[in-house]
Image (cartoon, rainbow, N blue to C red):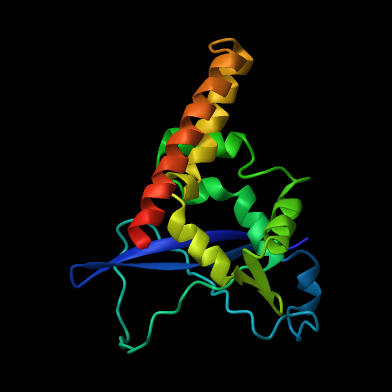
Amino acid sequence: MVRCSISGASVLLGGETFIGKGKTVTSLGWKVVYQNQTDPDTDKTESDQILPSVKSGDILKVLKTETKNELTKPPAYFTEGTLIAAMEKIHTVVDNPEYKKYLKEGDGIGTPATRAVIISELKRKGYLETKGKKICASSDGIELLKLVPELARNPILTAVFERKLRDVESGKSTLGSFIESQQKFILQEINKAKAINNGLQ
């Protein structure tokens, strides 16, 4: 087994901080066989860089600098696999520590058994469509997002529900009060959606 450690280093240069990331091989494992020859299984496109050993306070020489004019790239489209993974790891895009904790403990949006079903249902209703392996919002899906209040589109809502359900489970709250609060919330959000819809007309 080949063992590597992922490492990074920050360097102060001209008053700006630059960060370099790479990996350090700690054990060659089976690759010791190919030390002096080409490994046939090596991915020729692999771009992982090997970082030298540095420690805090080291002074490094800048041998070369260059600037590039490039355009930023939009995020890649989801595939069904990456969308399911994003639903599971939704806590990684939430800043609030408390909500992040509830989403992480609750395994994100949906469950392993329901995430693919959620996506299939959104496709069936015409809110998602596929282009090759890509999954993207359909025109109907985009219009729906314009009508839905911001909170209903935010993963924090799932965290709020998780917290309330935990309170019911621990006895801090009752199922009846949870259902009552959900009914009030749904009515409020419906009224907000109606107001947004009226404003678009």
Q: Residue at the location (64% across, 40% down)?
A: 107
Task: Tell me the quarter of the image containing the C terminus.
Answer: bottom left
Name the side, left or right, on which 1 lies relative to 49: right
Q: Between 155 and 88, which is closer to the camera in this rendering?
A: 155
User: Can you see residue 27?
Assistant: no
Q: Between 148 and 44, which is closer to the camera in this rendering?
A: 148
User: Residue 73: x and y, percent?
Assistant: 44, 79
Looking at this rendering, what residue extends furthest in the top direction?
Answer: 171
Q: Between 125 and 52, which is closer to the camera in this rendering?
A: 125
Looking at this rendering, what residue extends furthest in the left direction?
Answer: 15
Task: Tell me the quarter of the image containing the N terminus.
Answer: bottom right
User: Can you see residue 19?
Assistant: yes
Q: Residue at the location (67% across, 44% down)?
A: 110
Q: Is residue 163 above or below residue 69?
A: above
Name the side, left or right, on which 36 lies relative to 72: right
Q: Is residue 164 above or below residue 92?
A: above
Q: Between 60 and 189, which is closer to the camera in this rendering?
A: 189
User: Residue 43: x and y, percent?
Assistant: 71, 81
Name the side, left or right, on which 37 lies relative to 10: right
Q: Is residue 97 above or below residue 168?
A: below
Q: Residue at the location (50% across, 24% down)?
A: 181
Counting the numbered discs, the total is 0
User: Residue 12: x and y, percent?
Assistant: 26, 66
Q: Residue at the location (30% across, 87% down)?
A: 67
User: Residue 82: x and y, percent?
Assistant: 65, 63
